[in-house]
Amino acid sequence: MIHFQSEQAMIDFGEKLAGLLFPGSILTLEGELGAGKTTFTKGIGKGLGIKKVINSPTFTIVKVYQGKLPLYHFDAYRLEGQDEELGFEEMFEDEGVCVIEWPIYIQDILPSEKLEIQILKNEDESRSMILKPHGEKYEKIVKELGLC
Amino acid sequence: MSLILAIESSCDEMSIAILKDKRELLCNVVASQIDTHRLFGGVVPEIASRMHVECVSTVLKTALQQANINMADIDAIAVTKGPGLVGSLHVGMQAAKTLALAYHKPLIGVHHIAGHIYANELVEDIKYPCLCLVVSGGHSELVYMKSEFSFEVIGQTLDDAIGEAYDKVGRVLHLPYPGGPVIDKMAAEGKHAYHLPLPLNDDSYNFSFSGLKSAVINLCHNASQRGEDIVPSDLACSFQEVALEVLVSKTIKAAKDYNVNEIIVAGGVSANKGLRQKLSQESPIKVLFPPMSYCTDNAAMIASAGRIMYEHQRFSPLDLSVKPSYDLEEESVDE
C-alpha cells in the first residue's frame, strides 16, 4: 500500500507509472466518488506526454488522447446493468493505454491480464493506493516501482 | 435557400429535424419524447444504441410526414459526428450516410457542441464577436467566437462538467437521475445554509467542479457521523449558488475581457432556471438563452449548425467516422 499526502504526490506517482506502461496496457481504477481517479489519470497522461486537459469521461464513457501512446480513459459508471456490445474490446486490444474507472460494471469484457488499482480516501483527506497485478507484465511493473 | 435534414443520436435520444433556411423548422422529432408505447410498443432503454437502430426508420418517416417533404427536395444531410457515445452516434451516422448515398445528397458532419451553440440562432441572429458558455453533462467551456462558425476554447473544466457535478451531487442526495433539474427545483425552495468552497476562484477562465462535489460528499458524510440530518433543499441551494457563482462570474469576466457584443448559453444546463436568472441579472452584456425545448439534445440544433456549414460548403466525405471526442476549434471555418 502506498500513501499520498497530497494530490500532487498522486499525480507524480501516475506520471512515474506511465513511464513503465507498454502498448496495450490495461489499468482499472477503483475508488469511491471523489477518491481521485481522474486526478490520478491526469498523472498518467502527463507521463505519456499528453498536453490536452484530461477531464472526466463520465458523460461520453470514453475519451481518447494522443500521447507517446494513445490514452483511452473510460468511465463505466453509466453502463451499470446493461450488456450491450459497445466496441470497447477493440480499444482494449489496441496499442494504447486503457485506464478504466468503475471497472465493476464491465468486468465481463475486461481482459484477465491487467493492473488493478484501488484508491482509498482516508479520514484525514490523504489517499492510499493498492496495486494488484494480474499477469507477468504487470507483476514486473509493480516490481519496478519497488512495491514488492 | 436551403433545406437541411439533420440527425442527432449522440446520447439516449434519436432525433431528426428538417430546417428550411435559417429558422423555419418544418419538424423536430425526438424519439424519447414521443409516445414510445404507441410507436414502438415498448420501453426505450437508457442507453439506446440498439433502440436507435430500431426506431431510426420510424423517426425518419414521421419527420418526413410532419414536414410534408420528399427526400428528393432535401439539399443536404447533416449528422452529429461527436462527441458522444460511440454506439449511439454510429446509428445516426449510418442512417445519414445511407441517405446521402442513396439520394445523392452532400453529407455534413456536425460537432455536437456547434449544434448546441447554434440552437440559439433558431431564435435570433447571433451578434459577433460573442462569448458562448457551454454547459452540459459532458461539457463546461467558454468559447470565444469572433465571427460566424469560429471557435476558440478560452476556458474549460479541468475535471467534472457542471451537469455531471449536479448529477453526482444528486446521487449523494439520493435523488432520481438526472439530478440536475431536481436540484435546480429544490434549490429554489432552500436557503444557502451550508458553507461550501468556491471552486477554482482564480483569474483563469477554467472551471473545476470536482472539489465542490467532494465538499458536498464530505459534508454529508460528516453530518451522518455526527448523527445530524442534512436539509436536502438547503444543500441543493448551497451547492447551486456556489456552482453558479463561479460559472457566472467567470463568464462575465471573459465577456468583458474579450469585449463581446453578447453572451450566448448552450447545452443541457442552459435550461437551469437558477443560471438563467443569475446570468441575466448580473451581466451588463446581453445574454441569449436557447428556448427550453432546444436545450436538451435535438436535431433542430444540428440542422441549424448544418445550415451554416452548408452555406460554407463544409461537406464531409462518405467515410466520415464518429468519435467520442472531436476538437471544437478544428471545426472553425477559415477567414
Image: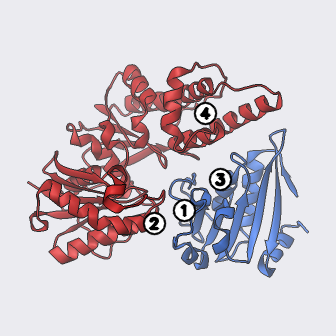
Q: Nearer the viewer, residue B325 or B233?
A: B233
Residue at numbered disc 2: B86
Q: How far from the left and from the top, in percent, is residue A88?
A: 55, 72
Q: In the structure shown, which secondary structural element does the residue marked by tag 3 occupy?
A: helix
Label 3, label 4: how far apart the Cα atoms are: 17 Å
**Which chain does tag 3 point to?**
A
Q: Colour of chain A?
A: blue
What's the amino acid at mark 2? Val
Label 3, label 2: how far apart the Cα atoms are: 21 Å
Q: How far from the left and from the top, in percent, is residue A92?
A: 61, 75
* Residue lying at 19% horizontally and 69% vertically, measured from the top left: B106
Q: Which chain is red?
A: B
Callout in the foreground (3, 2)? 2
Image marks 3 and 1: residues in contact by CB distance under 8 Å? no
What's the amino acid at mark 3? Thr
Q: Earlier in the sequence, mark 2 or mark 4?
A: 2
Question: Where B230 sits versus B76, above or below?
Answer: above
Q: In the structure shown, which secondary structural element does the residue marked by tag 4 occupy?
A: loop
Callout in the foreground (3, 1)? 1
Residue at numbered disc 1: A62
Q: Are marks 2 and 4 on the same chain?
A: yes
Label 3, label 1: how far apart the Cα atoms are: 12 Å
Residue at numbered disc 4: B199
Q: Nearer the viewer, residue B251 or B254?
A: B251
The crowd level at tag 2 (other Cα within 10 Å; few <14, some 14-19, many 20+) is many
Answer with the quarter of the image where residue B50 lies.
bottom left
Q: In the structure shown, which secondary structural element does the residue marked by tag 2 occupy?
A: helix
Q: Earlier in the sequence, mark 3 or mark 1?
A: 3
Answer with the quarter of the image where residue B126 lies.
top left
Q: In the structure shown, which secondary structural element does the residue marked by tag 1 occupy?
A: strand
Callout in the foreground (1, 4)? 1
The crowd level at tag 1 (other Cα within 10 Å; few <14, some 14-19, many 20+) is many
